[in-house]
């Protein structure tokens, strides 16, 4: 679109640094939708049963969904300004630092992350996401990711609210090679080598690249790197066959039948880590203690991958009649999960039901400049206003970003003292 630069600039000006985004829906042919994304019941197969059910909604995305038979713009978020629509990807390419900030634009020349809700009736096959070196071999980028389970989206847990992660300590590479060799025998038994963790709304996990995981059936908010690479290592899930092409699609073609190569692609030490939960599990951490003022901001995704701060996320709750100003010094994508109100001069409303293709008032993108100056959020409704916002790489000073396990310090500090026995 020739005039996207002017449209995007005008939209930023009118929104005081905020951009209104339309819902972005993504289907997956190998999964069954959990039907908690607020889509109209008739619309979960709006793209046709041959494409699969819609089980994901992507936020602030400039990343393509790498599905077979995909639409040209599948996965991309659209900015809506008056009667005009244009992709956030095009807007960022035109305005660069004015949207994502100088440091991100200088290093990446794009918005390098995105987030999503994924929502399934049952579990996803045990799979991994390649690291940068591996993904580069097929012209893509690696994908570390993170999970947070919003309570507002998880009134029910569906069929299997447990996630298998990694392998039991003592598992050998030959065990996994043997499992892959059984691909066409039915269930290849790879989950027999793994451990499942019960999922708890209001908590989350970090998932490094090259670590196997079979996400469970809670609705998951998933800040992650801007890539859609994966390899499925489980041959059947819930009695449905997983095409072997989903194991090999993001590996070099000459390696598709090299089982040793496919197993060596896993980060072995992280997969068999006996302290996997301690090293990857997160719980929210309050940012200051401001609940007496009618609001509370919390870290929900934090920590680092290989020492690098790649993405993070916060959850803001504003009580009825209250308002606050949030300052982050970094661009972010916002999605409202509960309530109504406003952010800056834009209305916020968490919808009850959405028709496919319809507009909503629950999602915005906050430019770096607006975030640094401060954005006012007000609750004009009768229930809490809750919004999730995710950030890109190096968004915060190291001293400000919590580490994995830091939630334990606050839990201990908040616990009442034990009474002494008489």
Image: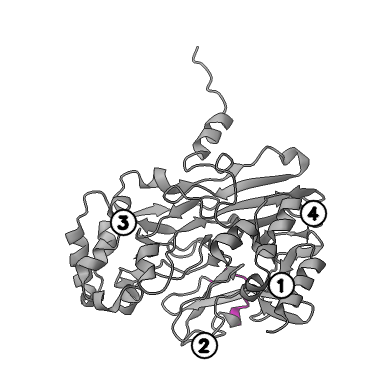
**Quarter occupied by residue 271:** bottom left
User: Which of pointers 1 and 3 lies earlier in the amino acid sequence?
Assistant: 3
Of the residues tagged 4 and 3, which is closer to the observer? 3
User: Which of pointers 4 and 3 lies earlier in the amino acid sequence?
Assistant: 3
Residue 311 numbered mark, or none: none
Label 4 packing within 10 angstroms: few (<14), some (14-19), many (20+):
many
User: Which of pointers 1 and 4 lies earlier in the amino acid sequence?
Assistant: 1
**Residue that mark 2 sits on:** 48
Label 2 packing within 10 angstroms: few (<14), some (14-19), many (20+):
few
Q: Residue at x 47, y 50 (%)?
A: 308
Q: Report the Cα–Cα distance between label 4 and label 2.
A: 40 Å
Q: Please say if the residues under marks 4 and 3 sit with CB atoms less than 8 Å apart.
A: no
Q: Of residues 86 and 183, which is closer to you in this image? A: 86
Q: Report the Cα–Cα distance between label 1 and label 3.
A: 41 Å
- Residue 195 lies in magenta, yes or no? no
Q: Please say if the residues under marks 2 and 1 sit with CB atoms less than 8 Å apart.
A: no
Label 3 SS: loop
User: Which of pointers 2 and 1 lies earlier in the amino acid sequence?
Assistant: 2
Q: Is residue 246 left or right of residue 282?
A: left
Residue 360 numbered mark, or none: 1
**Residue that mark 3 sits on:** 267
x and y, in percent, of residue 301 in the image: 54, 51
Q: Please say if the residues under marks 1 and 3 sit with CB atoms less than 8 Å apart.
A: no
**Residue that mark 4 sits on:** 378
Q: Please say if the residues under marks 3 and 2 sit with CB atoms less than 8 Å apart.
A: no
Label 3 packing within 10 angstroms: few (<14), some (14-19), many (20+):
some
User: Which of pointers 4 and 2 lies earlier in the amino acid sequence?
Assistant: 2
x and y, in percent, of residue 393 in the image: 55, 55
Q: Is residue 114 left or right of residue 291?
A: left
- Residue 39 lies in magenta, yes or no? yes
Magenta segment: 35-42
């Amino acid at each position: 679109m020739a005039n996207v630069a002017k449209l995007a600039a005008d939209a930023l000006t009118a929104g005081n640094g905020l951009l209104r985004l339309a819902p972005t829906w993504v289907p997956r042919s190998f999964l069954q939708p959990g039907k908690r994304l607020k889509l109209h019941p008739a619309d979960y197969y709006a793209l046709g049963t041959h494409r699969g059910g819609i089980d994901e909604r992507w936020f602030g995305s400039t990343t393509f969904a790498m599905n077979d038979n995909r639409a040209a713009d599948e996965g991309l978020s659209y900015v809506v300004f008056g009667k005009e629509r244009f992709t956030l990807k095009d807007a960022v390419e035109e305005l660069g630092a004015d949207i994502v900030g100088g440091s991100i634009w200088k290093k990446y020349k794009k918005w390098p992350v995105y987030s999503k809700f994924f929502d399934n009736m049952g579990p996803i096959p045990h799979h991994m996401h390649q690291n940068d070196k591996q993904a580069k071999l097929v012209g893509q980028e690696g994908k570390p990711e993170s999970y947070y389970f919003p309570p507002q989206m998880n009134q029910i847990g569906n069929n299997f609210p447990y996630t298998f992660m990694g392998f039991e300590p003592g598992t050998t590479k030959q065990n996994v090679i043997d499992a892959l060799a059984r691909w066409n025998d039915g269930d290849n038994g790879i989950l027999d080598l793994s451990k499942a963790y019960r999922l708890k709304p209001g908590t989350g996990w970090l998932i490094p690249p090259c670590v196997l995981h079979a996400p469970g059936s809670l609705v998951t908010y998933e800040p992650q790197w801007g890539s859609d690479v994966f390899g499925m290592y489980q041959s059947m899930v819930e009695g449905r066959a997983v095409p072997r092409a989903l194991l090999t699609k993001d590996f070099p073609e000459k390696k598709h039948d090299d089982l040793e190569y496919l197993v060596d692609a896993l980060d072995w030490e992280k997969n068999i880590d006996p302290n996997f939960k301690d090293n990857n599990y997160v719980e929210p951490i309050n940012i200051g203690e401001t609940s007496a003022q009618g609001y509370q901001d919390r870290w929900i995704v934090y920590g680092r991958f290989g020492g690098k701060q790649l993405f993070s996320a916060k959850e803001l709750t504003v009580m009825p009649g209250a308002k606050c100003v949030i300052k982050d010094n970094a661009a972010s994508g916002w999605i409202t999960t509960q309530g109504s109100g406003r952010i800056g001069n834009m209305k916020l409303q968490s919808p009850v039901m959405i028709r496919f293709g319809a507009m909503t008032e629950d999602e915005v993108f906050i430019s770096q400049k607006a975030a640094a100056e401060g954005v006012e959020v007000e609750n004009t409704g009768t229930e809490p206003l809750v919004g999730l916002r995710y950030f890109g790489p190096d968004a915060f000073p190291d001293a400000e970003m919590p580490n994995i396990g830091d939630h334990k310090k606050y839990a201990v500090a908040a616990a009442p003292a034990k009474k002494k026995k008489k």
